[in-house]
Image (cartoon, helix red, strand yellow):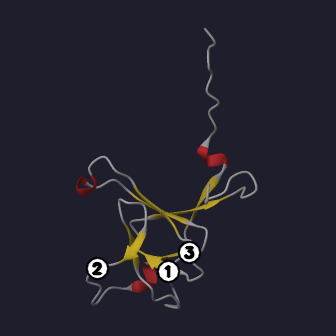
Amino acid sequence: MKKHTLSHKRLGDYISEVDVRNRDLSVTTLLGVSISKEFIPSIANTIGTDMSTYKIVRKGQFAYGPVTSRNGNKVSIALLSNENNAIISQAYTVLRLKKPTKCSPNT
């Protein structure tokens, strides 16, 4: 019987965290991340919220939301594929591909 070996790769070799804040309030589109792995319009009440602390996510970047009790066993992660920058809560982690020639967010 032929034995298959798995080739493990370090995720950190391919992605890195991005932390760009909306300090100048130039981005106004507020999004959230669904458990179906899509960006969705945010339904958060932002009245009185300091939007300058929110994170900017750009085309080709991912947003990852830490596991919450409402997610069950699903992970909240999404790829921003349109041209428009958006902002997301500071609770999310924004990630980018370090080596886009080695892997593609669209595959």
Q: Quadrant of the C terminus?
A: bottom right
Q: Earlier in the sequence, mark 2 or mark 1?
A: 2
Which residue lies at the image location 32% right of the left edge and 85% below the top edge?
49
Tell me whether circle 2 and circle 1 mark residues in contact (CB < 8 Å): no
Q: Nearer the viewer, residue 49 or 60?
A: 60
Q: CA distance from mark 3 to mark 2?
A: 22 Å
Q: Quadrant of the N terminus?
A: top right
Image coordinates for residue 40, horizontal then vertical, percent: 38, 74
In the rendered image, which residue does mark 3 sit on? 20
- Residue extending farthest to the top is 1
Q: Is residue 107 left or right of residue 73?
A: right
Q: CA distance from mark 2 to mark 1?
A: 14 Å
In the rendered image, which residue does mark 1 sit on? 86
In the rendered image, which residue does mark 2 sit on? 43
For the residue marked with disc 2, what is the amino acid? Answer: Ile
Which residue lies at the image location 51% right of the left edge and 85% below the top edge?
23
- Residue extending farthest to the right is 101
Q: CA distance from mark 3 to mark 1?
A: 11 Å
> Element at badge 3?
loop
For the residue marked with disc 3, what is the amino acid? Answer: Val
Q: Can residue 89 be seen in this snapshot?
A: no
How crowded pointer 2 is (Cα within 10 Å; few <14, some 14-19, many 20+) is rated as few
For the residue marked with disc 1, what is the amino acid? Answer: Ala
> Element at badge 1?
strand
Give residue 96's quadrant in the image.
bottom right
